[in-house]
Image (spheres, rainbow, N blue to C red):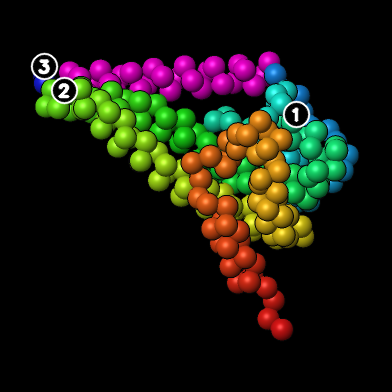
Amino acid sequence: MIKLMPILLAILYGVVIYRFSAWRTAKQLDAQSTELADPMLRVLMDRMAAALDLPRLRVHIYEIDPVNGLAAPDGRIFITRGFYNKFRAGEVTGDELASVIAHEMGHVALGHSRRRMIDFSGQNALRTALAMVLGRFIPGVGPWIAGLLTSLLAARLSRSDEYEADAYAAALLTKAGIGVAPQISLFQKLDALTQSNGGTAPAWLLSHPKTEERIAALRALETKWAPAQ
């Protein structure tokens, strides 16, 4: 039992961190967000809602400047004020912003948003447990190895999630009559979005597959779904 204590403590730590992170995230979003009510975007969101047989699709604006989209663990969808301002300025089209919303909906529908919060807590627990174990056998280097292994696992999970959310968004946008093109054109604006974001890539592009690989995957789906001539 004593030998298992570090692992049990790490698991307990992960559970506590998960609950605290979920609570803190919800409180922060509640305090800094309002429902999106733009008439043009409402039309696009209604088309996506109809494609999913939903009465309405709710999206919120998160009042921060970085260009970003977010799927909260409780299932709510957010775009940042910075992203909305890009749309208002004409740098991002309504269809392109709809593609971000569809992508975040994919994370919710496929269970990624909640699982990511759990994964984050689990990764902290795993990192702690590995550091304890490896630290006994490889003093000094053990914790570094534990961190590296955990980061590699997290990156692999993230890349898989992004491809799945891209595919979900592509299917939804196609069914809604918007199409895959806005996803592709938004990815092609990555450099401009990154530079205007203080040199930092949006969170939905960090630890993700390479942009050109995501575009290639979308083009493959577009070709696959194209009606036969």
- Give above or below for 141 relative to 113: above
Q: Is residue 170 magenta?
A: no
The percent coordinates of residue 18 (x first, y second) are 43, 23
Residue farthest right in this picture? 39
Q: Residues in magenta?
A: 5-31
- Give above or below for 37 relative to 176: above
What label does residue 81 carry, if any? 1
What label does residue 162 carry, if any? none
- Give above or below for 165 relative to 22: below
Name the residue nearer the viewer: 196 or 106: 196
* Image quadrant in which you'd find residue 70: top right
- Report crowding for label 1: few under 14, some 14 to 19, many 20 or more residues within 10 A (C-alpha): many
Residue receiving disc 3: 2
**At 46% across and 49% down in the image, what residue appears?**
160
Residue receiving disc 2: 139
Secondary structure that dominates the magenta span: helix
**At 63% across and 34% down in the image, what residue appears?**
199
Q: Is residue 114 visible?
A: yes
The N terminus is located in which quarter?
Answer: top left
* Image quadrant in which you'd find residue 144: top left
Q: Is tag 1's residue or tag 2's residue first in the polypeptide sequence?
A: 1
Q: Assess whether mark 3 and mark 2 are in contact (beta carbons under 8 angstroms).
A: no
Closer to us: mark 2 or mark 3? 2
The percent coordinates of residue 22 (x first, y second) are 51, 22
